[in-house]
Image (cartoon, helix red, strand yellow):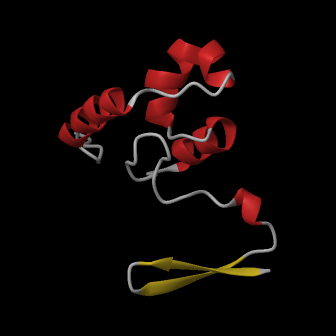
């Protein structure tokens, strides 16, 4: 079963039999791009990226399981902090 998604002026065709296994391009919690395999694993487990898993889910696991999510103000602070961090790794 194919699904067509409209993003801006582009139509994206997703060719997939099982749409529930699709991982979004950005984290539904912090709206930062999904970067790597650890983000995919975290998304499949908690519906968020690995950084949200570490910073938000683990410290609030009981509340998270009851559908608690951080406020817009808290998420704004988190996004601001994340944008200051490099999105790449440097090796010596």
Q: x and y percent of residue 12 in the render?
A: 54, 82
Q: Assign the C terminus to one quadrant of the image.
A: top left
Q: Is residue 13 above or below residue 89?
A: below
What residue is shown at x 25% (from left), y 43% (from top)? 90
Q: x and y percent of residue 78 in the render?
A: 31, 31
Pick whichever, 88 or 58, lies toward us: 58
Pick whichever, 8 or 50, lies toward us: 8
Q: x and y percent of residue 63 in the render?
A: 61, 16
Q: Quadrant of residue 24?
A: bottom right
Pick whichever, 85 or 20, lies toward us: 20
| Residue farthest left in this picture | 84
Q: Is residue 27 left or right of residue 14?
A: left
| Residue farthest front in this picture | 72
Q: x and y percent of residue 47 in the render?
A: 61, 41
Q: Is residue 34 above or below residue 69?
A: below
What residue is shown at x 54% (from left), y 41% (from top)? 38
Q: Assign the N terminus to one quadrant of the image.
A: bottom right
What residue is shown at x 74% (from left), y 66% (from top)? 19
Q: Is residue 48 above or below residue 34?
A: above
- How many numbered discs sit on the rendered protein? 0
What residue is shown at x 47% (from left), y 40% (from top)? 29
């Amino acid at each position: 079963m194919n699904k067509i998604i409209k993003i801006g002026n582009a139509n994206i065709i997703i060719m997939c039999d099982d749409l529930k296994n699709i991982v979004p391009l950005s984290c539904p919690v912090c709206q930062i791009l999904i970067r790597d395999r650890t983000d995919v694993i975290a998304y499949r487990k908690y519906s968020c990226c690995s950084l949200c898993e570490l910073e938000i889910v683990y410290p609030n696991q009981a509340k998270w399981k009851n559908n608690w999510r951080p406020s817009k103000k808290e998420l704004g602070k988190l996004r601001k902090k994340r944008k200051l961090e490099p999105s790449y790794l440097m090796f010596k």
